[in-house]
Image (cartoon, rainbow, N blue to C red):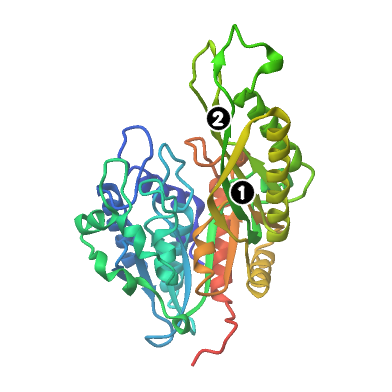
Amino acid sequence: MPDSLLSGPALLARIDALAAISAEEGRLSRLYLTPEHRRANDLVAGWMREAGMGVREDAVGNIIGRYEGERPGLPALLIGSHLDTVRDAGRYDGMLGVLTGIAVVADLNARGRRPPFAVEVIGFGDEEGTRFQSTLIGSRAIAGTFDPAVLETRDAAGTRLADAMTAFGLDPAAWASAAYKANDVLAYAELHIEQGPVLEALGRPVGIVTAIAGATRLAVTVEGMAGHAGTVPMTLRRDALAASAEMILAVEQLCSGQERLVGTVGRIEASPGATNVIPGKVRFTIDLRADRDPLRLERVGAVRARLEAIADARGVAIGFETLHESPAVACHPALMAQFAAAASAEGLDAPELPSGAGHDAMAVAALTDIAMLFVRCERGISHNPAERITAADAEAGARVLARFVENFQPATSIP
C-alpha cells in the first residue's frame, strides 16, 4: 500500500484543511446547509475525484463518491461519516471517517484494484442536528426513514429547513430520491474517533464497536410553591429546587454500578430565579443511555418511580416529557469479525466496546448491516477544540479500514 495515501500525517493535513472551513474565526463551527457546508462539500468532492471516484450531491446535501467495482453498477459497500459540526467543535469528529474512506479508495485506485463490488464514500450533511435540532438528517434520508415533517422545522433565525435546502441549490420536494434501494447496498462501515477514554486506558489505537447505545431523554418539571426566603419556615416549604436536587442525586445513584449504563442531568432551570425567593418551579433534563434496551427501559421506569416518590414526600408536583427515544443498534457480528481480522493482520489487538454516542450508523442500520471502527481519542475529549488524535493512530485506523475493504465478504452473493 502506498504510504503517502494512508499515512497519518497526510490524513491529518487534510483534516486541518477541512477544519479551516468555519463560520467563526478561531473556532470550528460548520452547520448544515450553510455557505461553510457548501465549501466543505466542494473540497471533499475534489478529493473524491482525485481518488478516482465519480461524485454526486444528493437531494439533502450529502456528498457521495462512488468507486466502481469489477464492472459498473455492482452493489456497494458504503463507508461514511459526517461533515457538519457542533459549535466550537473538535476537528476529528465525523471528518476523520470521511477522509479515511477517501484515502482507502485512493489506495485501491493507485494500485489498480477493482473489488467485486462498488465502494461509496458518503460525507453526510447533518448528523449533529445543531442548526435545525433534528439529528441524522443525511443518514436518515439515505436509509429511507427521513420524516418530511422535518422540512418545516426552523433554525434560530427562523429559516425553514425547506427554504435552506433551496438556498443551498437543492429541491426539497425531491428528498425521497436520496434513499438507497436495499439490494444496491451490501453493508455500511464507519470509522470514528471513540469520543471516550476506554481505548486510551487500554493502550490500544483502535477498537471494534459492538453496539450503539439506545437513549431516552426526558424533561422533568417540578412545581412547588414560591415564597419569601425570609418569612416561610423551613418546615412549611414546598421548595421545587431542593426537591430537584434530591431527584438529581437519585438519578446518579440509580445509574451507577450498572455496566454500560449512564445517566446524566445536563440542564436545570429554576424560577423565579431570585436570590430572596424560594424556587417555585424547576425544569431539568435526564439523558439515560445503555447498549441494551431492556436495561435502559427498566432504569427509566426506576428513575420515574423514585422521582415521583421524592415529589410525593416533599409535597411538590412532578411531570415528565419524553424528548427523545431511540433503541440500541447492534453491529453485525460477521462485520465485526472482519474488522477484527483486519486489525490482527495489521498486528493490532482491537478490543470490543460499545458506543455511548450516537452516529450515522444507527440511522443506516434501517437500510443494511453496520459495523464501526473506533480510533483512540486523547483523554476521551470530543465536541471540544481540545479533541486530539495522533498521526500514528489515524494511520492505524486507515490501514485497518483498508484491509477490511480489500477483504470484505458480503453476507449475500453479488449477482
Q: Is residue 273 above or below residue 197?
A: above
Residue drawn at x 66%, y 57% as measured from the top left = 207
Name the residue carrying label 1. Answer: 376
Q: Residue at x 53, y 52 (%)?
A: 324
In the image, residue 223 sits, relative to residue 110, either above or below, namely above
Residue type for callout 1:
Arg
Categorize mark 2 by other alpha carbons within 10 Å: few (<14), some (14-19), many (20+). Answer: many
Picture coordinates of residue 117 (x, y %)? 47, 82
Identify the residue under disc 2.
282
Residue 53 appears in view: no
Pair 2/1: label in front: 2
161 up-or-down from 86: above or below: below
Q: Which mark is residue 107?
A: none
Residue type beneath disc 2: Val
The relative height of residue 401 versus residue 228 in the rendered view (above or below) is below
Badges 2 and 1: C-beta atoms under 8 Å apart? no
Residue beneath the point at 68% across and 34% down: 311
Residue 36: % across, % down: 28, 47
Classed neighbour count for the residue bearing mark 1: other residues with Cα under 10 Å, few (<14), some (14–19), many (≥20) = many
Q: Nearer the viewer, residue 102 or 251?
A: 251
* Element class at badge 1: loop
Q: Nearer the viewer, residue 293 or 302?
A: 302
- Displayed quadrant of residue 161: bottom left
- Residue 332 image point, x, y percent: 64, 71
Q: What is the secondary structure assignment of the residue under circle 2?
A: strand
Residue drawn at the location 68% of the way across and 60% of the way down? 293
Res. 184 visible in picture: yes
> In the image, 37: left or right of 385?
left
